[in-house]
Image: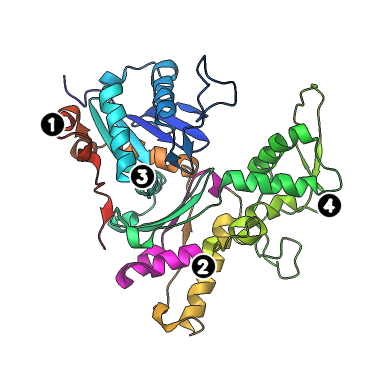
Amino acid sequence: MDDFARPALVIDCGSAFIKAGFAGEVSPAVRDPSTVPRAAGLEPGPPLVPVKHGIVQDWDAMEQLWLDVTYRRLHVYTSDQPVILTEPPQNSPESREQAAEVMFESLDVPALHIGVQAQLALYADYAARQAMGSQTSSASLTGLVVESGEGCTHVIPLVDGFLLASGTRSMPLGGAQLTRHIQALMRKGAAPPPPDQSLEIAVAVKERQCFVAAVGGGPWSSASSNQVPGSVPDGPFKVGRHGLATGQPLRIQLGEERWRGPELFFDPGAFTKDATPSLPDLIDDAIQACPIDTRRALYGNIVLSGGSTLFKGLARRLETEVQARVAARVQGRAPASHAAATGVEVHVVTHPMQHFGAWFGGSVLGASEAFREVAITRAAYMETGPTIVRNNVVHSDW
């Protein structure tokens, strides 16, 4: 039987959710929490979390999660399905080998490709722009991907689809840290939420109410003359009703929590005492670490991906602040070693597939002929062993 007779199964497992579905689809069929119940006989406790900060920490739980998603949720036999897995940009070769070992030896998949999330997110942006009728070219596969999920945020430059390791950066801030920050802000408010519901409410506020202010001083700052349209109505703010354990509805009055939460991307010191650069600084530093002839294209195609990049106003704020850093460098207010050409335009891209960009990119790849060229078959794995996946071809030596 042809190893590629059936559509590829695309699996993207993050710190909070696992997304899974079939190549050629526009959205994952499964989006479940990436947790595994404790097996009978183990000490009682919370569910196991196999992935932390994007890296697999518990391979037994990871295998169980993959089995649960494929057999129980998607109702497929993995022995019939080629698989595309995603991995973070700084995944170790040993972790990649372990994933291949589980897939080929335990799940018996006929073919496997492990794709870097940033590269797949760039494919997603390329395909989304094609679907919307935008003018595209090979340059669309050159860009800087800002991937922000639950556990951390990565900034990854790619040129013609190849990752430039020298420019890869990360910051230990993601959706979980934003949630805890919003929760702390609400507890300090005049009418804090019930303690047993504060986390649930903070998540809802983050996902439904938060936005990024146009300037660092907040939406009511005198410097904020260009606010996000519709984001700052007069008077107090209220979030929708949330059912409590008692079944009684609850209304929460909000204020500066709406913009101070996402402000962590621009002022990490409000959450952590570690010397963490802001997201605009991280983007600028990543591009400046790349070859000089790639920088203009990278500034012009900064692609957002992941659930923590969905805040209203984030793209425009990033565009403004990164452009200001470029302008300052051109005018000589930055070190000469960071010299940049004049006329550099910064463009931050959003698209409809942004929430699950890596998964959608895998779906695009799996539906193309290119998948046969990059996938490793079971026969090749059995001949060579796990080391066959040790080096990911997407990484560049630039």
Q: Read off the magenta span.
A: 281-310
Q: Secondary structure at mark 3?
A: helix
204 and 100: which is toward the camera:
100
340 left or right of 307?
A: left
Mark 4 or mark 1: whose residue is earlier in sequence: 4
Q: Which residue is mark 1?
A: 383
Please say whether residue 155 is visible from this viewpoint. yes
Answer few, some or many: residues within 10 Å of disc 4's Cα (few below 14, many 20 plus, some between 14 and 19). few
For residue 285: magenta?
Answer: yes
Q: Which residue is mark 2?
A: 322
Mark 3 or mark 4: whose residue is earlier in sequence: 3
Q: Secondary structure at mark 1?
A: helix
The residue at the point 53 percent across, 64 percent down is 280
Mark 4 or mark 2: whose residue is earlier in sequence: 4
Instruction: Name the disc covering residue 235, or none.
Output: 4
**Residue 339: image location, x then y, percent:** 40, 80
